[in-house]
Amino acid sequence: MPPLIDPSRLDLAAEYRAHPFGRHSPALQALLDTMRRAEHCQDLILVGIGDSRWMLGERRPNGQPPRLFTDEVFTRLEDGEWAAFKRRWRALTGSELDLP
Amino acid sequence: MTSPLTPGVIGYLDALTARPGETVTLRVSVLDGSPRYRAGLVRLISGETGSNGPGLKEEAIATSIDGEHDGAAQYTDAGSYAIVDALPTLSGKIELALLVRPGLVGGIQTLMALGPLRLVLDEAGAAALIVGEATVSTARPLRPQWWHRITASYDPATGDAHVASTPLPGPHAERAAAVARRVKNGIAATGPLLLAAERLAPGRTIRHFTGKLEAPRLGADGLAAEWDFATGISTTHIEDRSSHRLHGRTINAPKRAVTGAAWDGSVHDWRQDPAHYAAIHFHADDLYDAGWQESLRFALPDELRSGFYAVKLTTAGRPPFHVGFVVSPRRGKSQARLAVLASTMTYLAYANYRRRMSPGPFELAMGALPTVDMTDVLLAEHPEFGASTYDMHEDGSGVCHASARRPLFNMRPTGRFWNFSMDLCLIDWLEAQGIDYEVVSDHDLHTHGAALLAPYRVVMTGSHP
C-alpha cells in the first residue's frame, strides 16, 4: 500500500517550512489535512515553558497531563511546527525528511 | 510533587470584584513543598501577547501583602455528596433503600454511609453492603445509565445482612439479584448519614459515587426517614418527608433538577412537575468550594484606580501564578465617561477548561498546533480543581456549575490568548490612547442592575461578553 503522503514532494515540505502559518497551496493543504487527522496527528501540542520557549508535547486521554518531549526547546513557534511536521512525515512515509 | 516548570503556589480570592478601600481575602496553597512564597498586587495593563504584540505589562502596587509569607499545601475535598448531620442514635435493625442510576462502573462507590455500615457499588458495579470488615455483595453488576432499586438491611443483634438490586421495569428485569448472609454482629451504624460518598474525617470524603440517586430511605427502631429530592431543587437543602425532619444538605454542588426514575417524557421542565425530577446527579469530580483556610487578608488602597488586577504568587525558581480580579470604582464615585464591562461571568464559564488537554480536532480547525503552557499542565495534574462548563464529567454528562471558590486557571494575563488575557488588549489600547475609563464587572452589573452603567456615556464589552 503506498504511503498516504508522497515522500517525493519535498517541494511541499519546503513550502511549509518557509510559511508554516497562513494560506497554503492546495497540495500542501491536502497534505496537512492528512497529517492533522486524528489517526496521524500523534496528539501533538506546543507547551510554553516561559521566556518565549516551547516544547512539543503529546496529549493523553481524559485530560491527563501531557507527555513532554524535553530534549528539544524551541524559541519560535514556527520551529515547533516544523519539528511536528518532520515527526509526522517520518511516521507517514517511513523515511526521514531531509531538506537541503 | 509537581513538574519543576509549573507554578509552585496557587490561590483564589473570595470575590472576583472588589472596590478601593475594601478588604480582600486570599487563600493560598503551596504545591512544590516550599516553606515560603512571595505575594504582591499588580495592575494588569497588557497580557502575554507573543512576539507580535506589546507583551506582558503589569505594574506593582504597594500593599501590606508585599513580600514573603509562610505557606503550606491545602487539601481540596472534591466530589459531591449529601449529608444529614443530625442523626439520632440508631438502634435495632437498620434498613436502607434507594433508587440508583450508575453513571459508570469502577472502584468502590458509596451510595449510603453510616459509619462502619455502608451500602456501595463494589468494584464490579454490584450492590454490596459493607458491615465493618465484611462485604456482602450480590455479585451482579448494575447496568450503567439504567435505574435500579437497591435495598439492604443489617441486624446488629444477629449479624444478619441482606442486599438486593432490582432493575426498574424494563428489558433487563432478569438482572435482579439478592444475597443474604450472616456477618459479625454488634456493628453500630452511626451518623452522620452521607449519600454518594463516605467520610474519612470532617472535610475529607472518599469513594464518591458518580450517577443519579433518588428517594433514599433509612429505617431503624422508631425511625423511618425518607428524603425527597424533588423538594428544594433550587437549593442545597434535602428534605426528609418523615415526621423526624432529618433534613440535610448537598456539598460541592451536585446537579439537581435532573430527570428521575419517574420521568416519562411528558414534561421537560422541572418546574412543571418536580416529581419527575426527584433525582440528584452526583459526580466524583464536582467541586463548588475548595474550602481552603484563609492565608492573607489585605486592604486595597483607597485611591486605587479601577482596572484589571492580580495577586501575583511565586515560589523560588517557578513561574508565577496570577489570581486575577477586577477593581471597580467606588459606588457613586464614577468619574470616567467610559466603562469597560469585564466579562467575569464568561471568565467563570471557561474557568479550568480541560478539553484542550484531551485529544481532539482543534488543529484541523485552527491550522496550527494547539498551544498550552505550564500553568495549563498544572491544572491537568490536579483534577480536584474541577472543570469548566465546556467540559464533561467522567460519566459523559456535562458540567453545569462554575464556581469562583477554587483556583481559577484562566483569570490571568498569561497563557491562552482568550477572554481575560484578550480583554487586556482593550485596556492596553485605552491606556495608549490616553482615554479615561473605569472597569465594572458582570457580577457588579448582576448585583446593582442597570443603574451601575447610568453614569457612563459609553460601555465597552470585552472579547467574549
Image: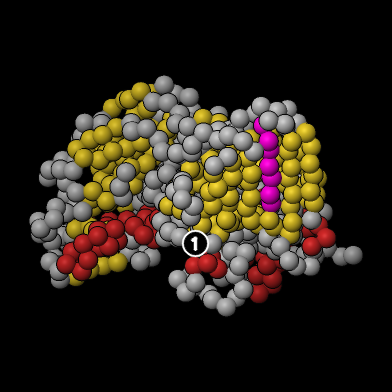
Q: Does the magenta stretch include residue B154?
A: yes
**Considering the numbered disc 1 on the image, is that residue within a helix, a strand or a loop?**
loop
Vertical comparison of B235 with B206: above or below: below
| Three-letter code for the amino acid on which mark 1 is drawn | Ala
Majority secondary structure in the magenta region? strand
Q: Give the chain of mark 1.
A: B
Percent across and percent down for residue A9 are: 75, 65
Percent across and percent down for residue B20 are: 16, 46
Left/right of residue B233 with respect to residue A70 in the rendered view? left
Vertical comparison of B45 with B5: above or below: below
The quadrant in which residue B60 appears is top left
| Residue holding disc 1 | B230
Q: Does the magenta stretch include residue B196?
A: no
Percent across and percent down for residue B221 are: 58, 40
Percent across and percent down for residue B358 are: 62, 53
Toward the right, the furthest residue is: A1
Counting every numbered tag in the picture gives: 1
Q: Magenta stretch: give its range.
A: B150-156
Toward the front, the furthest residue is: B222
Left/right of residue B2 with respect to residue A96 in the rendered view? left
Q: Which residue is drawn at 38% across and 49% down?
A: B404
The answer to whether one can see residue B416 in this image is no
Out of B138 and B124, give the one closest to the viewer.
B138
Q: Residue at x 49, y 36 (%)?
A: B88
Left/right of residue B115 with respect to residue B71 in the rendered view? right
The answer to whether one can see residue B27 in this image is yes
Vertical comparison of A10 with B23: above or below: below
